[in-house]
Amino acid sequence: MLKIKNLKAAINEKLILKGLDLEIKPGEVHAIMGPNGSGKSTLANVLSGKNGYEIEGEINFDGSNLNDLKTEERAQKGMFLAFQYPLEIPGVNTNIFLKTSLNSVRKARGEKELDTLTFLKLIKEKAKELNIDEKFLSRQLNVGFSGGEKKKNEILQMKLLEPKLSILDETDSGLDIDALRIVADGVNSYKNKENSFLIITHYQRLLDYIKPDYIHVLSAGKIIKTGNADLGKQLEKTGYANLS
Amino acid sequence: MKQSYDFNIEKIKDLSLEEKISRQKNLDLFYKSGFPTKKVEDWKFTDLNLILNKNFDSISNDINFESNKDLKIIKNFEHNYISLTNGKIISSSFDFEEKNKIIIKDFSQKDTTNFNSNNTLTLLNNALSSGGFSLEITKNYKLKKPLVVYNHFSKDLKNKILNNKNSIKLNEGSELILIDYNDSNTQGNFIRNTMDVVFLSDNAILKNILIQNAKSNGYFYKYIKGSLESGSNYENYILSSGLKLNKIEIEINLNKNNSSCGIYSALNLFEDQHQEIKTRINHNSPNCKSYQKIKNVLNDNSKGIYQGKIFVEKIAQKTDAYQLSKALILNDDAEFDAKPELEIYADDVKCSHGSTSGSIDSDAVHYLMTRGIPKKEAVKLLINGFLNEVLESITDNQIKIFLEKVLEKQINEH
């Protein structure tokens, strides 16, 4: 699904990722943990195709060289990034945004675009699963949403676009325990043998709800340790400092 | 190239000798200074004389008033209408209304002396006006459906100037949504100089919406003068993208207690387009409110201007006045100029103004792209969101949906 080899990334002439290797197979859930400043969000940004990074190394996503794909093509091919800080976009209606997004992806996949009625039926169902009030869908995108509502909105988009690889960047930050459970349930209900996840997190907390197959520890731009779910619990006790 | 004028009062039909003399006086005054240049303070951002010199080799008022037969009516939108060709009434329909409540007739220049001004375009209009419409709504009548004024133009208007005058009077407690709808398929460059006089009696409500339906070779100037009595409300929505040149000058006189006005504009301008909105809100009485929100998206080498003045008389205590202009500049060659002015003589007032301009939020574009939306579409969504905000205050859902569609079309096609 995703194969990263010796990835280096710099921004503003500062090297952040210093040779990262990672392989995620279909159906696997990987977590990347690490202290602040280790490069976790840079990895998410680079994978999403954000401008401003200088990149070296290989990233293969589902048979394509990721560097050849524009940001929107990555999404159309099935990569999804749930943002740590989802943007507030004034004036853009959430429903219109979601419909444009879904139809752009469907069009690129050679599927029929949905008309408004069919779309609204679908989005109402998906919103209900995540306990999202329908009223949010007719509001401006993320404007005035609480932290929890924004994160739920990200998971709603994930479930709508049905990606092959979902990257969750600090999705647990800013969530109370109820919202955390709803978000985790949303992810778990979408998990199957084909879909893969990359969960980027600072804390073990989210991993109590979404069980990873592998945990990687990122420190100073490199993965310094890989283990199973127990590694997260160990880190919670000992902290990152003892690893390096 | 320097253009030559061929302005002739004899071309205007059915004038009395007195009228001819009065018109000739106005024309002589116009000739003294000609079209305004940027040396005139009110025109410092729109050098009309220069723009006309560049785009017209001659200008005449010799207009053939043959009506445009292919009348297109907006579909799936219930409305009354007045249809004008070159500013003259051709037909009207008030199927949704009690017909005796609405008085519509040709504008008679003799009815008004309101147009004395130093503005040379007003002088020219006084001299050359070939009429327009005069609309009056009787006391307490609220129109059930909007009234669309279709502005059609004949095809042969190259190098012509049209001068029109209209008057809109709402008697006590009446309500109207008026949509001024320009539909032009005229080939050559032409000029339109329009003066609208608006009078709202106590508690009357007028929504005046200006729409440009298609790209046009028009060079338009419109002067709106509104006078508001107690508790009345006037709102302007300006969606005039598509014209080569457009300057709308709005003067609102809040003459009596508790009257209020709002001016909203959403423009998306492209190559060689130039639009200016100039306002003067005169708070002449206490407890009045005015609100202005001006939004421009400037592509290519387009130019947008907002000059907004709030004037508060000494007696106009408890005035609440607000103005804001925001511009998105999408190209290095595009330009936005804003000149806010406050002139306040009362001491217990709330007046605020703000102006921002900037480029599009690249993080927002990126966010939308990560959802599979191509960059061009993402930018359009953001432009739409930026401009759509001015429609927020519209509570009538039918009108709101209609205007959202107009705006979407202007963003996609113009």
Image (tube, rainbow, N blue to C red):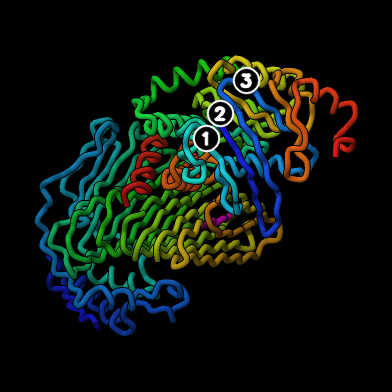
Q: Nearer the viewer, residue B10 or A67?
A: A67
Q: Does residue B164 appear in this view?
A: yes
Judged from the image, the secondary structure of the residue bearing numbered disc 2 is strand
**Residue labelled with disc 3:** A187
**Image point 23% across, 74% down: which residue?**
B56
Mark toward the viewer: 2 or 1: 1
Q: Which quadrant of the structure image shows residue A35?
A: top right
For label 2, count other residues whose C-alpha is less than 10 Å away and answer few (under 14), some (14-19) or many (20+): many
Specify the segment rendered in magenta. B323-327
Quick one: label 3 or label 1, which is nearer the N terminus?
1
Labels 3 and 2 positioned on one and the same chain: yes
What chain letter is assigned to the residue under label 1?
Answer: A
User: Mark 2 near mark 1, Cβ–Cβ under 8 Å?
Assistant: yes
Q: Which quadrant of the structure image shows residue B25?
A: bottom left
Judged from the image, the secondary structure of the residue bearing numbered disc 1 is strand
**Residue labelled with disc 2:** A165
The dominant secondary structure in magenta is strand
Amino acid type of the residue tagged 1 in the rendering: Phe
Q: Nearer the viewer, residue B178 or A166?
A: A166
